[in-house]
Amino acid sequence: MSDLFAAEEEERLALARPLADRLRPKTLADVSGQAHLTGPDGTLRRMIASGSLGSMIFWGPPGTGKTTVARLLSGETGLAFEQISAIFSGVADLKKVFESARARRMGGRQTLLFVDEIHRFNRAQQDSFLPVMEDGTIILVGATTENPSFELNAALLSRARVLTFKPHDAESLSELLTRAEAAEGRPLPLDEGARASLVRMADGDGRAVLTLAEEVWRAARSGEIFDAAALQDIVQRRAPVYDKGQDGHYNLISALHKSVRGSDPDAALYYLCRMFDAGEDPLYLGRRLVRMAVEDIGLADPQALVICNAAKDAYDYLGSPEGELALAEACVYLATAPKSNGVYTAYKAAMRAAKEHGSLLPPKHILNAPTKLMKGEGYGDGYRYDHDQPDAFSGQDYFPEKMGRQTFYDPPERGFERELRKRLDWWSKLRKERSQG
């Protein structure tokens, strides 16, 4: 009876484990969605086959299998496995792990140390890994959701290979749901539309799609099938993967800016709405739209800056959510406006010239002469008042004499700048004629 009771208790405890834990892959071949790493020709497979496993940084969003793959690597290579989290560990914990790894190495066995959220360690803590990586005490596998280029020491990165874990696509998430149904021995009570909606809600996170599936099974009554609307009511909705201070923030604002620059109003509006939906500060987005107006539209459409400032003021006046429509209007306006970085590039070129020639005095003829001494030095001599000249244009040279004339602003033949190009060409023609005369 005791053996039967123990078996029943073991089965009960197994079923009590979360579905994501029960479906954790047993081999690298079982890992879903990372074929470029774990498939037959994947990077990790090649490493294992070569018999040489180096330190690595696993970079990717949550729920893509970073922890699982690290465990499987240790199993398939015979390495001892140690796991710590940078959130809960400090210097003392690291010292203990390193001492255990040294003792193990003395016995002829190497340690694979998996560090979750490795970007949470400060620079000094990251440096502490370097000696034990170099002498072979540990093979480090660090996991991070943030861009390693920004969050990890250069010294650490130079000793580890960065492997990118991709978000699950719809196909791999659907495959996980099929495995879940097989494990549960019953289909998900969802119609086709609801099933597709569940996959979208998971936002590329394998753990999330299995957690959502569990919620659906718990909520369903006998014989009940949920459509997409009912599914949303049951599971509410999972917040998008987005950290306003980290990589998700910069990725989306970059996507928004490039969509505007690429004249794609639909993509631009999509990324703007994703940032609204994720709780981004609308005034931050207003400031970024103003920046896009001056950087990418410029004088091709001088109204772009006016409209963006008006949208920011409208948001200030209306608040959220009504004011968000004003920012959306500005976003679409920018995306559909003619594009020019003429002023932007001219500004950068002029700034370089200002730094290089910052000690040169302007030519004396354009300087005021408020004293007799300055008049005697030639200040103001030969200055011609443009309004008194034909076409209100004197054609004088205003650059420092040692510098000579420079050209920074080169307007393209687009939008309003086409008119500016005509003016500049006309003035250039007059300048040549009058300098020769």
Image: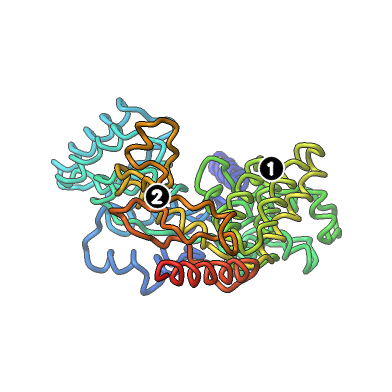
Q: Amino acid at mark 2?
A: Met
Q: Residue at x 70, y 56 (%)?
A: 303
* Image coordinates for residue 388, horizontal then vertical, percent: 58, 55
Task: Indicate whether 43 appears above or below 352.
Answer: below
Q: Nearer the viewer, residue 1 or 325?
A: 325
Tell me the tag on residue 351: 2
Q: Nearer the viewer, residue 291 or 372?
A: 372
Name the element at disc 2: helix
Is label 1 in a helix, a strand or a loop?
Answer: helix
Q: Amino acid at mark 1?
A: Pro
* Residue in the foreground of this view, choosing between 347 and 387: 387
Sequence-wise, the earlier of marks 2 and 1 is 1
* Relative to 117, 6 lies left or right: right
Check the picture and name the quadrant holding the N terminus. Answer: top right
User: From the viewer's perspective, is 138 left or right of 144?
Assistant: left
Write the residue at 46% across / 65% down. 34
Q: Is residue 141 visible?
A: yes
Asked whether the viewer can see residue 252, the reply is no
Residue that label 1 marks: 282
- At a point 18% along the width and 36% down the height, the residue shown is 103
Q: Quadrant of residue 178?
A: bottom right
Tell me where residue 340 sits by quadrant: bottom right
Q: Position of residue 126 (x, y in %)?
A: 30, 37
Q: CA distance from mark 2 to mark 1?
A: 31 Å
Q: Please state the horizontal and vertical placement of residue 386, each as a whole percent of the image.
A: 55, 55
